[in-house]
Amino acid sequence: MVGLVIVSHSAKIAEGIREFALELTKPDQRILAAGGLGDGALGTDATRISAAIEAADSGDGVVVLVDLGSGVLSAETALEFLDPQQAARTRIADAPLVEGAIAAAVEASVGAPLAEVVQAAEDARELHKR
Amino acid sequence: MNECLIKAVRAVGEEIIKNKEWLTELDSAIGDADHGINMARGFTAVDAKLDSLLGEKDAAAVLKAIGMTLISTVGGASGPLYGTAFLRAAAAVPGKNALGRDEVAAILAAAITGIKDRGKAVQGEKTMLDALEPAYAAFESGKAEGKTLAGCLALARDAAGKGVEYTKTIIATKGRASYLGERSLGHQDPGATSTHIILAALADFCRNIEEG
């Protein structure tokens, strides 16, 4: 099953989205939160993100959902810390964080392959609210 | 010799921490008012990390450890940007235990490539590159003229300072400041400013060493 990593400047946001996604899918799904800095400050940390990707990867790949700004830079930096094979099956989704994470989690929960999970996340930007 | 590199990085950290409030003030005008706080947090963590590197003979290992520390403690965009710059710098000087003009030139060139790759930025977008690229060019010209390391770094510092002034005249197209468009005119870029501070600290440090 494809794993997910939720990246946010805020640990609470990342953890909250993780909780939300798990509620809507399967409790044993590999959804990891990588938010905030080690000391509790707001920010993103590429080493936390790479560790979360390693933990989320069952061999089927990982989709990383990010908030904005340095979240994207840190996620890209994290890919450099992975072994090349694992990096090759990790994708940073160009998707809104909450909607993308939920769509990706549901898609992953039915055993969809990596490309389809990424697509589900990215299609979530079309979920209009009015 | 790495003791010298470690002292140089400590000197950089002191200047960053000394300028913490000013950098944050500059960032509050066009960014998210955290550059000074973030950089000071990063270099405080680097300072603590340096204690464990005193016996390290490989300059590349020292630079890599600094890069990883910045990446995991700075938090804002400058974390992955400066962090990547240090990681690429480390890769540019494998196995060296002393850094002279050629090595520092290679470090500056690698740092520029790293920041460009990571930030997908080029010169003229109101970023740290607007200080670092002219600094590197000035360093190389000093090297060609046969100046000492301190002399090359002094030229790099001056060019970076001019680069900071130049950022006042251009519109930001990267990062949070880009949301402001023309309203970013007249403000100097905090990232270019911190790059200038780093180069100035290195130039001072090397001048003091050369003058004994």
Image (cartoon, coloured by chain):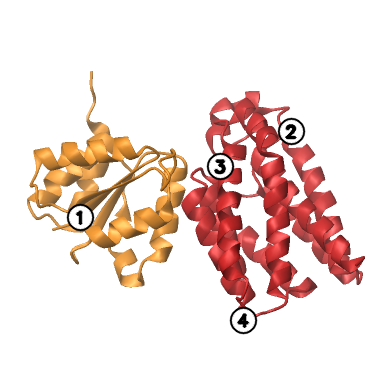
Chain colours: A orange, B red
Same chain, labels 3 and 1 = no
Which residue is found at the position 56% from the left and 49% from the top? B42
The answer for how far apart the CA atoms under marks 4 and 2 are is 40 Å
Q: Nearer the viewer, mark 2 or mark 3?
A: 3
At mark 4, the secondary structure is loop
Same chain, labels 4 and 1 = no
The answer for how far apart the CA atoms under marks 3 and 4 are is 30 Å
Q: Residue furthest top?
A: A130
At mark 1, the secondary structure is strand
Q: Nearer the viewer, mark 3 or mark 1?
A: 3
**Amino acid type of disc 3?**
Asn
The first of marks 3 and 4 along the sequence is 3
At mark 2, the secondary structure is loop
Residue at numbered disc 4 = B95
**Amino acid type of disc 2?**
Lys
Per the rendering, the mark at residue A3 is: 1
Residue at numbered disc 3 = B38
In the shown orientation, is residue B17 left or right of residue A66? right
The first of marks 4 and 2 along the sequence is 4
Q: Are marks 4 and 2 in contact (CB under 8 Å)?
A: no
The answer for how far apart the CA atoms under marks 4 and 1 are is 38 Å
Which residue is found at the position 71% from the left and 41% from the top? B18
Same chain, labels 4 and 2 = yes
Q: Position of residue B140 (x, y in %)?
A: 81, 65
**Amino acid type of disc 4?**
Gly
Q: Chain of mark 1?
A: A
Work out whether residue B159 can be spotted: yes
Classed neighbour count for the residue bearing mark 2: other residues with Cα under 10 Å, few (<14), some (14–19), many (≥20): some
Which residue is found at the position 36% from the left and 66% from the top? A82
Which residue is found at the position 7% from the left and 47% from the top? A26
Which quadrant would residue B110 be assigned to in this image?
Answer: bottom right
Per the rendering, the mark at residue B168 is: 2
